[in-house]
Amino acid sequence: MINVTVNGREHAFDGPPEMPLLWFLRDVLGMTGTKFGCGMALCGACTIHLDGTAVRGCVTPVAAAAGKKVTTIEGLSPDVSHPLQKAWQEFNVAQCGYCQPGQIMQAASLLKTTPKPNDAEIDAAMGGNLCRCGTYTRIRAAIKRAAEGGAA
């Protein structure tokens, strides 16, 4: 039995310990905010936090989350009041929106370690998160706004 805390709620999992955390979240818990992209940790669509650190859910086994805290996009701010979520709306970042949960979770991890990032720091942190719509300049602007505390 693997005990995992997801967004503040404890869950017991009696399945295969090597199951990717992404599938545990989506298929077992029904939390579909975290997206499947490439399955190889290359695109960032499945980015979640494990004890506050951004990880790729598609390659992180459930066993790695045993006794740890997992935060998904649903748990970042259930009422969409997180400064990044507000900035994302202000700058109309999402087009198709598919990659955005992973983008926001990666950005939240960046702001936790680097509260006032410059362009190079943002680009380095976000480089592993792909956006097929190409909204990178809006993503950078939204991260800067959230860092300033100016998201409306």
Image (spheres, helix red, strand yellow):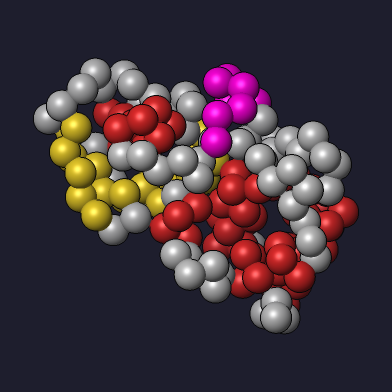
Query: What stretch of residues is rendered in magenta?
Result: 35-42
- Count of numbered circles in the view: 0
Magenta stretch secondary structure, dominant:
loop
In this view, 133 is above or below 109:
above
Q: At 28% from the left edge and 58% from the top edge, which residue is drawn?
A: 8
Q: Is residue 23 left or right of residue 108?
A: left
Q: At 76% from the left edge and 70% from the top edge, which residue is drawn?
A: 90
Q: Quadrant of the C terminus?
A: bottom right
Q: Can residue 127 be seen in this view?
A: no
Q: At 76% from the left edge and 64% from the top edge, which residue is drawn?
A: 142
Q: In which quarter of the image is the N terminus?
A: top left
Pinpoint residue 69: horizontal percent, then vertical percent: 32, 50
Pinpoint residue 98: horizontal percent, then vertical percent: 66, 40
Q: At 74% from the left edge and 43% from the top edge, which residue is drawn?
A: 96
Pinpoint residue 83: horizontal percent, then vertical percent: 61, 72
Query: For residue 138, what is the image quadrant?
Result: bottom right
Query: For residue 27, what is the image quadrant?
Result: top left
